[in-house]
Image: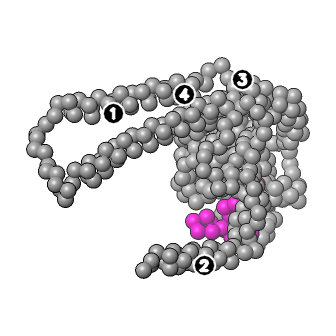
Amino acid sequence: MNTFAPRHRLVNRALQALFATGAGLAAGAAQAVNDLPGGPAVRQLDLHPAVTRIAEQQHWLHNFMLVVCVVIFVAVFGVMFYSILKHRKSIGHKAANFHESVAVEIAWTVVPFVIVIAMGAMATRTVVAMKDTSNADLTIKATGYQWKWGYDYLKGEGEGIAFLSTLDNAQRLMSDAGKPAGDDYLLKVDNPLVVPVDRKVRIITTANDVIHAWMVPALGVKQDAIPGFVRDTWFRAEKTGDFYGQCAELCGKEHAYMPIHVKVLSQADYAKWVEGQKKAMAAAADDPAKVWQLADLVARGEKVYAANCAACHRPDGKGAGPIKPLDGAAVVQDADAGKQIAVLLNGQNNGTMPAWKSLSDTEIAAVITYTKNHWSNKTGQAVQPSQVVAARK
């Protein structure tokens, strides 16, 4: 009697029931998802399509090493299973009795050594090229924060531009609600890193709090960002487009909400972007000696809070888990604004609350004023930028 067919049908039915249950749980939240150009693809098995020479070499080495490993696996286990089957005791073979074989000892020492040296030699050219950050056309510092990236254009066209890149707040709200949507779910940021095509871009990495890692697979780059250390890597994108990555170190509770978006533009479009950014920075430059009205500070602070604070402290200021609430917090309601200024400038709780020295004096004053006059905090207090300037000294 053939018992395989009934069992096969039972397995199929069980799997169909499992898949139906999963589909039912996802009903209403699941939407059609397509490949994201420059990012992950639906049911992706291979590496991201390469847009740099280094990434192409990495792909070739990956495939070559995989072939070598498969050949070794088949050869070793083929000989082993052949020996087990053809020389087993049940068909009359008797075990050989010997203590050593010089030829075998030499063979299994020399052959793996040659294979490893050959594989290493083939990878050396790519590894050396990955570390050659000289003669860069553009140098950008990427600073990891819990949980966002800060970009400073240090050298080349765009020198002086600086901004923070944070997960788009709408993406975080979708995650909190358990309703993901869009091909770029948890990869959309408010300010992408913008670079020109066909130019060598050097990325200097460091971190403000814990270890992060700047990784964009399509560009073939992954470099740790370590507090107190400076590391560097580089890429030269050969086509325009949007390319996505993420922090590749487990950097804390918001690790999954720290994406990287690199926008590669043509030379002409990049020049226009640089011009626009410098005009915007000049227009946004604030006089730290200016005395602001309370309503203006609150309006400005609301934008700063949404971009930088709401992800952890929540839009309602209630916090969650180890993140302290701001609604009703003693330090927020305290008449001595210097205490809250010190928290934003220096952080606290071993980095659970990171330092925000990267924000301007006006932005820090505005967001503190906002928290002091929002939710149940009706203090009527206004913190001026000059107070932050004094606290920085």
User: What residue is pinned by disc 3?
Assistant: 137
- Whether residue 318 is in magenta: the answer is yes
User: What residue is pinned by disc 2?
Assistant: 17
What amino acid does circle 4 point to?
Thr
Q: Nearer the viewer, residue 140 or 293?
A: 140
Residue 365 as seen in the image, left or right of residue 245: right
Q: Main secondary structure of the magenta part?
A: loop
Helix, strand or loop under label 3: loop
Q: Earlier in the sequence, mark 2 or mark 1?
A: 2
- Label 1–label 4 contact, CB within 8 A: no
Q: Earlier in the sequence, mark 3 or mark 2?
A: 2
- Label 3–label 4 contact, CB within 8 A: no
Q: Report how far apart the C-alphas of labels 2 and 1 lie in the structure.
A: 48 Å
User: What residue is pinned by disc 1?
Assistant: 112
Tell me if mark 4 has few (under 14), some (14-19) or many (20+) residues whose alpha carbon lies within 10 angstroms of its own.
Answer: some
What amino acid does circle 2 point to?
Ala
Q: Which residues are magenta?
A: 307-326
User: What residue is pinned by disc 4?
Assistant: 126
Which of the 4 image quarters holds residue 118? top left
Q: Earlier in the sequence, mark 3 or mark 4?
A: 4
Give the label, 4 or 2, closer to the camera: 2
Q: Looking at the picture, how far across and down is residue 23, in whole percent?
A: 67, 74
Give the label, 3 or 2, closer to the camera: 2
Q: Report how far apart the C-alphas of labels 4 and 2 lie in the structure.
A: 48 Å
Q: Quadrant of the C terminus?
A: top right
Measured along the vertical axis of the image, is residue 303 above or below residue 323?
A: above
